Image (spheres, rainbow, N blue to C red):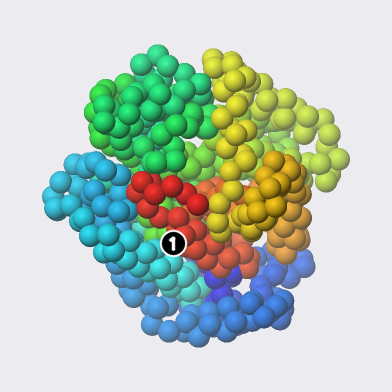
Amino acid sequence: MSLGADASGVTTAAEPAESAGSAESAVEIAPAELLARPGQPGTAELRPASGPIDWVMSTVIRKLSWSRLADPKVAISVSAAGLLLGMVVGATAPNMETLPLRLPLSTILPPLHHAIIAPVMLYTGNVLACLGLAGMLWAHSQGWRPDPRRLLLASAGIVAVLVSLTPVGSSDTASYAAYGRIAALGGNPYMTNPREYLGPGSLSLYTRAVGVHWKTTPSVYGPIATVIQRTAATIGGADAATTIWILMILNGIVFIGVGWLLLKTSDDPIRATLFWTANPVLIQQLVGGGHLDTFVAAAAICSIQVARRVWVSGTWGDVLIGVVIGLACGVKATAVLIALGLAWPLLRRHEWMRTARIAAVSLATVAFEYSFYGLKALVPLFDAAKLVTLPSPWWFVHEVGHVLHAGPATATLITVLWPIAMIAVAAAVYRRISSDQPREVVAPFALTFAWIIVAPWVFAWYTAIAWAALTQVPRNRMTRWLTLVTVLLALWHSSGGQIPAK
């Protein structure tokens, strides 16, 4: 099986495991691209690799898929080892990969001040998590039928530990806490910044924990996110560690909540559970890092599932879809990709009125949310849209413009071109996934995956919405790419936030 042929297999939960090792399952493991056969939902046909990179990947994956890594016990052990390394990094805070504070379970072990050991452990954990995920998917393709409820319970136990450890790999949770503290004190986090409102790091524990690049940056998160942050800060008070702990707990609850929702509503609950709840890569990035993108993914999957179930139910169904999308955008602006993805099949079917109705309700919901802060709350968001970082290909364009002293013109060029490139990549992904699959699922995934590939500013935790959408897309070749991109980004951008992003 290739990673592109995901964990769904060819059997249902009610079928005997032996059938998963049939000729159809063998097709999954072959070194070829897997696309559904026309007129046969959920089946696959062999097609040759479309390029040298695909050929190399397929050859390597074919060999690994029959190795010991595809043994469920080995795959789970590798996943556990990866997660354990991440836990040790969080438990030995503060270090190079964590915030400069300690949560309850981070007080058990002494701080790890060595500049090399913590990054090596976290990077190794990321790679092992990737291999463990691949092994579990291969094992499932070859007949492993785990009980998704047990996977959910096991994941809940791991999450319960992670939320009490200092966040690793990023300082975002410190920014969330600081913005919440500003709001709790009566300030407007969209009009000020942690250093300006809370004082320098020498005076404020909140400012001290915020990453170097973000100490002077106003909030770029939506009003719903601000409500969550303010609630945590109101409880935490002047203690930044308590506020961050509460945010971590809320994040963990939402992560498991999404897993429960997928278990109850997905066509293939085993596949959905392997892709989300039991996905060591996501657990490490979203829960271990405490990222708000978990909430975005939750709203995204709710939008998709509501759309799938009320797609033809009339006006009230459209209103419900619009409200859910509006709430999602109130967490983080990237949720607009889900809105565009759900509108895509409607526009292709020329359902103009339905599209307009959903869009109007979504915009009204977002307008209501931002009415408490005014249009100026959007200014930091537009400023953030100009940021460019590696490994985005636009970084090279940005640097060339800087060398040629054409910075403003280059920034404008990038702003105009990257959405066009995103749409082009999304269209290519959209066409590669079988036409018999539900378009309200395929289109959101295509757009979110293309955004991760093309956007000038992207991190590993941004892939959460693509993973959430992918849980609903039957077997397709994109799983391998999403996994590799997620791990590449995790290895590229991983620190406690005290080093500015480049």
Q: Secondary structure at mark 1?
A: helix
In front here: 300 or 109? 109
Q: Position of residue 6 (x, y in %)?
A: 55, 67
Question: Residue at 36% across / 57% down in the picture?
Answer: 151
- Residue at point 31% right, 38% down? 209
User: Position of 50 compared to 20: left or right?
Assistant: right
The quarter of the displayed image where residue 243 is located: top left
State the residue in front, 145 or 60: 60
Does residue 54 appear in the picture of this structure? Answer: yes
Residue ID for mark 1: 491
Q: Is residue 440 visible?
A: no
x, y percent for residue 186: 40, 14
Depth order, front residue of 413/174: 413
Tell me the kind of residue under disc 1: Leu
Q: Residue at position x 30%, y 54% from top?
A: 96
Give whichever of 468, 401 is nearer the camera: 401
Q: Position of residue 385 (x, y in %)?
A: 62, 39
Residue 235 figure quarter: top left
Callout 1 environment at 10 Å: few (<14), some (14 to 19), or many (20+)? many
Residue 128 is left or right of residue 400, and the answer is: left
Q: Position of residue 268 (x, y in %)?
A: 53, 58
Task: Specify whether 403 is left or right of 67.
Answer: right
